[in-house]
Image: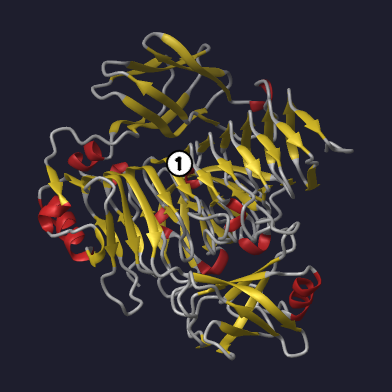
Amino acid sequence: KNLPVAISYETMTESERVEAGLVAAVDSGKLTEAKSWSYTLKQGGDYQLGTAWVEVLSAGEVEIVMTLNGKVVKTVTASNDPSKVKGRTSDDFGFFRLESRFEGLAPGSRIEIKAVPSGDVAYRLAFHFVSTTPDFTGLKVLNVADYGAVGDGLTDDMAAIHKAVAAAKAAGGAIIRFEKEKHYRVIGKDDLTYEVAFELFDTANIKIEGHGSTIILHPPDGLAKIQRSRNIQIDGLFVDYDPLPYYQGKVTEINIEKMTVDLVVPERYPVPLTGKCESKSPYFARSFAPDHPGARTSHKTQSIYIDSVTALDDPRHVRLHVGQAAKGSDFAHRTMKPRLIAAKKAGATEFIVPHKEYGHRDGLTSILRSARIKFSNVRYYVVPYFWMQVKGNSGPVTFENVDLKMKHPETELLASWRDGFHIKNARFGTLIDGCDMDGAAQYDDTFAIYTRIHNVVSQESNTLTMDAGFRDHKDLHTWVKGDWVSIWNKDQTHLRGMARMVALQNVPESEKRFHLTFEQLPSGIEPGDVVINDEVLNRGTLIRNCTTSSTGAGPYASTRFRASDIRFENTRFESFHFKTEFNPFWGTPRSRGVSVKECTFGGPRTMVTLSSPIGVHFEDCHFDGVTVVAPSKAEKVVFRDSSWSNVSKMI
């Protein structure tokens, strides 16, 4: 098979590095004296220090000092013996991470990173210092109207938008401008082919200026697909769908014996299509039982898998034929009858049903293997399946004021059928700032931040033969020479040690096997041990100033961490399940180094579950009616200056 090639700053051309915002890439090699690296910034904005670490190679300490215009902003003391450093133990990692953010810098600002060993100490360090703020200085403006876009909400503007994008690519970059507050209908092919309005593959220096206009997509299409690209921004858009990828109906009867649900569908939706859904995706409806008469929130909700739909006496009076099990899901053995009984017992008043052709299909916006990407001031009203797929990015990705909020929460119950921010294998942490979600109307995780583990098959000298992780994903394109890995026993209760990868070799005749060669390996490695690429753990991800709401048919929104060094700041979690997840079925690593500061947890059914994390720090947080639960192997959990109300037990 043709496997994708790993993309990193080292594999980019010089011009691509500039587009990606690279200021410096340092891999020092062995040092024994003090050394500093300083940079005067030509461009203002925000910057990140990523894939950054220091390793002390001999007895003693090294202090890393970061300054901004001469003022110290961060210090890290690293030691060959971590147990001698405050907050570390002898079981801790053998080297120290340096990921950092520098925000709101003015042009001409000076950043210095200085390493100061205490005496005759050997060490080495590495980092990438990059701009996260896209720059479009000097680029020409292309108006979509000049390429035939009408913006009347009726004309199909897909071809015109594609022409404008093609012209921007041909020019080496441009600002594509939409007319203020117009409505651009985007249809393209009508044969269920997944298309996007903005297809940005292998390109750079493109900004979409929406000026408050609305893109009306036809499902299963999506807004954008950005892949192997740099210096991209999409700003100032509303995103809607017509037809909607779902419909709601008022329940007239739930028949347990016949396994059917009868609905009356209002005029605001098209007449539902009947027959059997042929999509390979899971096809499930969602029951809704209000908390109280007239409420638009529900805690007794169930996913009900549907075999087919038939019309009754009227095209808007339909019958859902419920399947025996959760066909197409990862848990296909789960039976539907208990769920249907529960929905009836709870007094379900409505069902949300995927459109027979468009529901549970595509629709996602994706950012793949790219750098210096920003979405800002974008509001989605609904999406057909997943919302944001953010995977394998070599550089920073920013979401600023990007919302998933229903247009009519007083009547509607669906924002998305699956995950919201689905973030995997990022080398730089993603920034999610000022984003608001109708979380209980998303029927999966609002934030899913993760990577996958791999397992050792055998060892020969400094080479490990590996088995692919969950669903046989080798993820070969995520490995780059020089990556650090952590090696754990099978249950991830004991760290064998750290190792730096120097070579990767695929085993093409095997769907699962590949080889990793390291500088050296720790002792005691056994078959079945877990290997985690520590450079793609989404380190430095920051989620701040966000909110989730309880509107919708889900019991709550949720987050699942399978990553490290994630921070939450000043975020309100309402009807939310905040969860650090450890589940061998999903091939997940234990979460490490999660920081939660000045956040509020409250509202119906909000939960905090700490499943096997290594380090979760809550500071200045408030828990209203929420008891924190740590069911298994939670280590280094700290609560500082936090408060609880309306609970009998805090933890």
Which of the pair 315/578 is nearer the observer?
A: 315
Which of the pair 414/134 is nearer the observer?
A: 414
Q: Quadrant of residue 264?
A: bottom right
Which of the pair 605/233 is nearer the observer?
A: 605
Quarter of the image with the N terminus is bottom left
Left or right, residue 528 beside residue 161 = right
- Where residue 22 sits: x, y (%)? 29, 34
| Residue at 28% from the left image edge and 64% from the top image edge | 186
Query: Looking at the image, can residue 611 be seen?
Result: no
- Where residue 199 sits: x, y (%)? 26, 59
| Residue at 75% from the left image edge and 63% from the top image edge | 300
In this rendering, is residue 9 above or below 369? Answer: above
Q: What element carries label 1?
A: loop
- Give the mark count: 1
Q: In which quarter of the image is residue 508?
A: bottom left
Which of the pair 442/111 is nearer the observer?
A: 442
Left or right, residue 268 beside residue 297 = left
Quarter of the image with the C terminus is top right
Q: Please name the amino acid that badge 1 sits on.
A: Thr
Residue annotated with mark 1: 430
- Where residue 50 sits: x, y (%)? 42, 34
Query: Looking at the image, can residue 157 be seen?
Result: yes
